[in-house]
Image: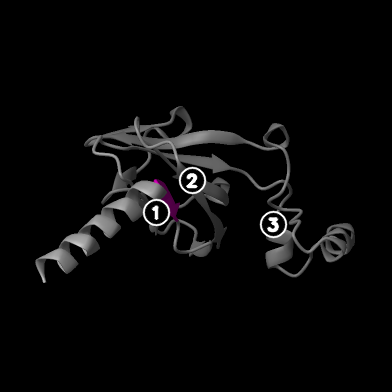
């Protein structure tokens, strides 16, 4: 019995080491109301024994998504996305064509807000969840949860969630 238990424990640790860092965002799209609070969830697992650095980044839409949510999307965007089902005209563009900024970072128990977000009720709670106190119009876009550990460089270190703020 002890050998079987020892083998399972060994297999578990070997699997954790082989997989390395794994970051997942359970909700890929979230719709929330203007001036209401929200939490963007992020989970991670790592084989590292060092503390992880958590960073949330914001990337604006490539083009305005409000028209689509109100049923007024452009016919050009519709025809392009129909030709290539993997491509999303609102999400897929170079970072140089959109706004990219750091929302918040957490190292240990210290949370630091990016310059644009200072003075707002924003923090990182639990291990890596981004909590926003009051949503603003400009908060719609993509949010990336990025985890960095000094000695776990293999695996998937980021995942994203789309946030759409409605009135």
What residue is drawn where x is 51% and y is 63%? Answer: 30
Going 18% across and 68% down the picture, which residue do you hit?
Answer: 4
Categorize mark 1 by other alpha carbons within 10 Å: few (<14), some (14-19), many (20+): many
SS assignment at label 2: strand
Question: Looking at this view, is 74 or 80 the one in front?
Answer: 80
Q: Which numbered tag is attached to residue 15? A: none
Instruction: Please provide the residue range marked out in magenta.
Output: 19-24
Give the x, y percent position of residue 155.
46, 45
Q: Earlier in the sequence, mark 3 or mark 1?
A: 1
Q: How much space separates mark 3 and mark 1, taking CA atoms?
A: 24 Å
Residue 21 shown in magenta: yes
10 Å crowding of disc 2: few (<14), some (14-19), many (20+): many
Q: Nearer the viewer, mark 2 or mark 3?
A: 2
Find out whether residue 53 is within the magenta segment: no
In the rendered view, tell whether residue 32 sits above or below residue 55.
below
Quickly name the residue at label 1.
42
């Amino acid at each position: 019995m002890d050998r079987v238990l020892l083998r399972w424990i060994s297999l578990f640790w070997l699997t954790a080491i082989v997989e390395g860092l794994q970051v997942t965002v359970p909700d890929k799209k979230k719709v929330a109301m203007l001036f209401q609070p929200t939490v963007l969830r992020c989970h991670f697992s790592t084989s590292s024994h060092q503390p992880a650095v958590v960073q949330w980044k914001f990337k604006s839409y490539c083009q305005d998504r409000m028209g689509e949510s109100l049923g007024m999307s452009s016919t050009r965007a519709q025809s392009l996305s129909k030709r290539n089902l993997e491509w999303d005209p609102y999400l897929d563009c170079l970072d140089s064509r959109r706004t990219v900024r750091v929302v918040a970072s957490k190292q240990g128990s210290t949370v630091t807000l990016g310059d644009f977000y200072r003075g707002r009720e924003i923090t990182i709670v639990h291990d890596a969840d981004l909590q926003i106190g009051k949503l603003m119009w400009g908060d719609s876009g993509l949010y990336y949860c990025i985890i960095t550990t000094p000695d776990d460089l293999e695996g998937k270190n980021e995942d994203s969630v789309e946030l759409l703020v409605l009135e």
